[in-house]
Image: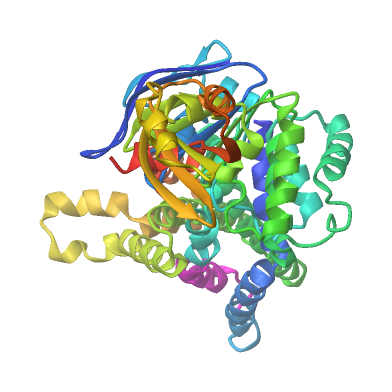
Amino acid sequence: MIEVQGLTKTYGKERAVNAISFEVKKGEVLGFLGPNGAGKTTTMKVITCYLPPTEGTVVVDGLDVRTHGIDIRRRIGYLPEHTPLYHDMQVYDYLLFVASMRGVPAADRNWRIGEMTDVCGLGTVLAKPIEALSKGYRQRVGLAQAMIHNPPIVILDEPTSGLDPNQIVEIRELIKAIGTERTVILSTHILTEVEASCDRVLIINKGAIEADGTPNELRTMYRGAQQIRLGIQHAGPAVAQTLEAWPHARVTGHVVHDGETLFSLTSDRPDDVRPELFRLAVDNGWTLTELHRNQANLEDVFRQLTTA
Amino acid sequence: MHETWTLTKRELHAYFDSPAAYVVLSVFLLFTGWFFSNPLFIENVASLRSFFEYARGIFLFLVPAITMSLFAEERRAGTLELLLTMPIRDWQIILGKLLAATLLLSAALALTLVYALTLSILGDLDLGGTVGGYLGLLLYGMSCASIGLLASSLTRNQIVAFILGFAIITVLFMLDKVTLFVPQALAGVLQYLSLDYHYNNLLRGVIDTRDILYYLSITAFACVLTAYNLARRPE
C-alpha cells in the first residue's frame, strides 16, 4: 500500500530523515516509535504530500508522491500533531467543509457526517463551536475529519498526546476500530501505545530505522541475555555446585532469605531455559519455590536502540 | 474548481460569523458616507468624485486588515498543513482566499451603490466616471488584497502581516507622487507601477485595457510570490 525507498529529507543542512526504506501492507496498523525529533513527523509529511522528498521514492497505492500528489491526497486521511482545527467553526460545519474539500459527493455528505458522528461519538457536540470542546473531543473531531471521505489510508501524528488517561483509552479503542478495515500509520513516543494498537512497529532514531517488526518480534530480537530467578528451599553447597556446572546458564549471584536461596542466572540462549531448569530441580530432588524469567519489554528495546 | 469555491465559502463564513465583516463594512460605510454627504449637503455638489477620491485612502488600511488573517492565522493554528494536504492545489487555495477577500470588498462597494442611486435621482450622474470609478475601486481593491495575502503568507503574526501589507501597498500607492525626485527615465516607470496612477485614469471615465491589465498583473504577480512562499511549506 505504501512503499518508501531510500527516503531522505533535509531541511537546509540538517538531515531530518536519512535514507529510510519500509513498506506498509494493506490493512496493517503501523506504529512509528521514536524520541522527539527522530524524523517520524517528517516521514509522515512526505507520505501525505505536504513536503516533497529530497531523495528517494515514496509510492502510495501505486502512485508516486512527486507526480500524483493530488490523487494520493484523496486516498489519505491525515491528522497532524496538535490537532489543528478551525476553532471558530461549529463541528458540523467543519466536517461539512472537510467533506466538501475532500470530494465527498454532496448527496453523501450528511450520511458520512452521521457515520463519523456515530464512530467518533460526536452526537452531543455537533452544534458546538470547536473552541468550546475539551481536548478529547477535539481529538475525536480530528479523527472524524481524517476519515470523513472513507480513505483507505489514515495517518495520525501523535493522536493521544496531551489527553488524560481515560481519553487515551477511548482514542485507542477508536484507532483499533479504524484499523480493522484501513491501513493506519500512527506515530508516538509512548511505548504502551504501540503495544496496545499496532500490528507492526518501526523504531526510528536520528532519521534512521533502528528496528522493524511486530512488538513480539522486537521483544524477542532484542531480549539479549535472559535473566532467571530461581528459588530453592534449604539449598546446600551441592545445589550451588550443580548450578555452577550446568552448561546452559551462569550463576551471577545468590541471596539466602528465610531458608530459601534465590539464585540469579543469566543465559544467552534464545529459547526459554526454564523447563530444563525445572527438570534439573526434579532430577536432583530440590524443592522449587520460585522460577521467574525477566523478559525485555519494548521499553528496554527502545532505550537500548535510541540511547546508544 | 469546486474545492476553490468551498474554501471561498469557508472564508466568507469566517468573515460573517465573526464581527470582522461587520466592522469592515460599518467603518467603510461610515467614512465613505461622510465623504459622500459632505459635498452634497455643504457644497451642494451632486458628485461621487469625493467618495471615489477618499475610498482609495480607506482601502489602504482596510484591505490589509481584511487579508491579514488569511494565511497568518492558518500558520499560527497549524491548519495550513491540513489545508495543504487536502486534494487542492496551492494556487487554488490562494485563489479561493483572494476571491473571499475580493467578495467582501465587493459587498462593501455594493452597499455604496445607494450613493450613486441617490445622485441619479437628484441630478445628473456622470455614468462613465461612476462605472470607471467602481471598476477602478474593485480592481485596485483586488490588487491590494493580493498584496495583503502575500504579506499574510510571510508571517504567523497577524499584526506583522497587517503592517507589512499596509507598507507595501502604501509604497506602491505613493510611487507616482515621488516622480519629481527621480531621473526622467525612471519617472515613467514609477508612474506606471503606481497603484494610484491607474486608478486616476479609470476615475476619468476612460476604461483603458492598459489600466485593467496593470491591476491584473499586480494581482497575478503577488499571487505568484505567495505561491512561491507557500511552496516552501512555512511552519
**Residue B62 picture location, percent across and down:** 52, 68
Q: Is residue B13 visible?
A: no
Task: State the residue in front, B133 or A16.
Answer: A16
Residue B217 position (above or below residue B71): above
Residue displayed at 66% across by 66% down: B21
Q: Position of residue B203 (x, y in %)?
A: 49, 58
Answer whether residue B129 is visible to the viewer in this image: yes
Nearer-the-camera pick, A80 or A192: A192
Q: Is residue B86 left or right of residue A133?
A: left
Q: Is residue A148 left or right of residue A125?
A: left
Q: Quadrant of the N terminus of chain B?
A: top right
Q: Tell me if residue B47 is in the magenta stretch.
A: yes
Q: Position of residue B39 (x, y in %)?
A: 59, 82
Q: Nearer the viewer, residue B43 or A214?
A: A214
Residue A252, x across and y down, in percent:
35, 40
Horizontal side of residue A129 vs B92, given as left or right:
right
Q: Is residue B16 above or below residue B47?
A: above
In this view, which residue lies farthest toward the top?
A62
Q: Residue at x 73, y 67 (%)?
A: A132
Query: Residue A123 or B3: which is nearer the viewer?
Result: A123
In this view, A259 is above or below A23: below
Asked where in the image residue B199 lies, by quadrant, the reply is bottom left
* Quadrant assignment, res B47: bottom right
Task: Using the rendered view, name the quadrant where residue A157 is placed.
Answer: top right
Q: Total of numbered circles in the picture? A: 0
Q: Is residue A248 above or below residue B216?
A: above
Characterize the magenta stretch by its predominant secondary structure. helix
Identify the residue at image location x=37%, y=36%.
A251
Residue occupying the point 39% across, 33% down = A266
Q: Magenta region: which residues?
A: B45-62
Residue at the limit of the structure toward the bottom, as seen here: B42
Q: State yes or no: residue B190 in magenta.
A: no
